[in-house]
Image: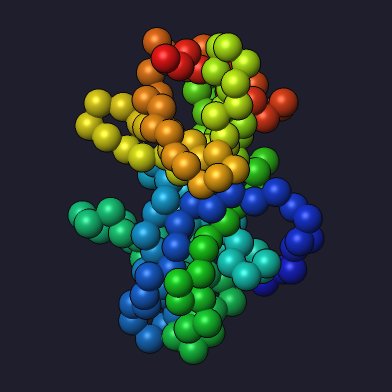
Amino acid sequence: MKHRIQSDSQLVVVGVVIGFWKLDGHIKIKPLTSNHHRFDIGNIVIIENRKFKITSSIKNKNNLVYVKFAGVSTRSDVEGFYRKNIYIGIEQIDELPDGTFYYFQLIGIEVWTHKEVLLGNIVEILKSSANDVFVVQNGSGNETLIPAVKETILDVDVKSNKMLVKYI
């Protein structure tokens, strides 16, 4: 099943093709999602603006997934997907509880202090053992690290693209 999609659709990256498996068109995926069912049989994913239905899915102990798509029968059918991102439509993401956000919702958001000073935009989110850390970059390229803890993050308004933080 290969269908072209509109380029203006909102998409979310959920994985990346890192290799191939077998000669029958299986691809090896590194998931970029915590949803373990994202690559289950029957699900639809998007690569290179084409929709594919998953017909085979094998998860291994190294957190990799091997999938095969409907209409794909040889390795040459998928070789062009190497290092390509795998997307889903934004309408396929699960709703989160209030006060929690997907990373893609926070990347690019403006970060303001409680004293109304613009620190910059979130350009990266680092995982640490204690909590996530937002990397905020200003117009000059200087970076500020903001811990993603409730004592620091005062408000997040994704619709207005604004985060308010307590900053000393």
Relative to 79, is 8 on the left or the right? right
Res 64 → quadrant: bottom left
Relative to 8, is 51 on the left or the right? left
Res 24 → quadrant: bottom left
Tell me the residue at 39%/54% (across/down).
Answer: 31
Estimate the x, y position of residue 151 in percent, counting from the top left.
40, 10
Estimate the x, y position of residue 86 in percent, counting from the top left.
53, 61
Between 104 and 40, the residue placed more toward the observer is 104
Toward the bottom, the furthest residue is 76
Q: Is residue 40 visible?
A: no
Please say if 154 is above or below 119: above
Q: Is residue 148 visible?
A: yes
Estimate the x, y position of residue 103 in percent, counting from the top left.
50, 38
Estimate the x, y position of residue 133 in percent, counting from the top left.
37, 32
Tell me the residue at 25%/26% (across/down).
Answer: 130
- Quadrant where the C terminus sits is top left
Relative to 8, is 145 on the left or the right? left
Between 75 and 102, the residue placed more toward the observer is 102
Tell me the residue at 36%/75% (across/down).
Answer: 19
Tell me the residue at 48%/83% (across/down).
Answer: 79
Please say if 127 is above or below 82: above
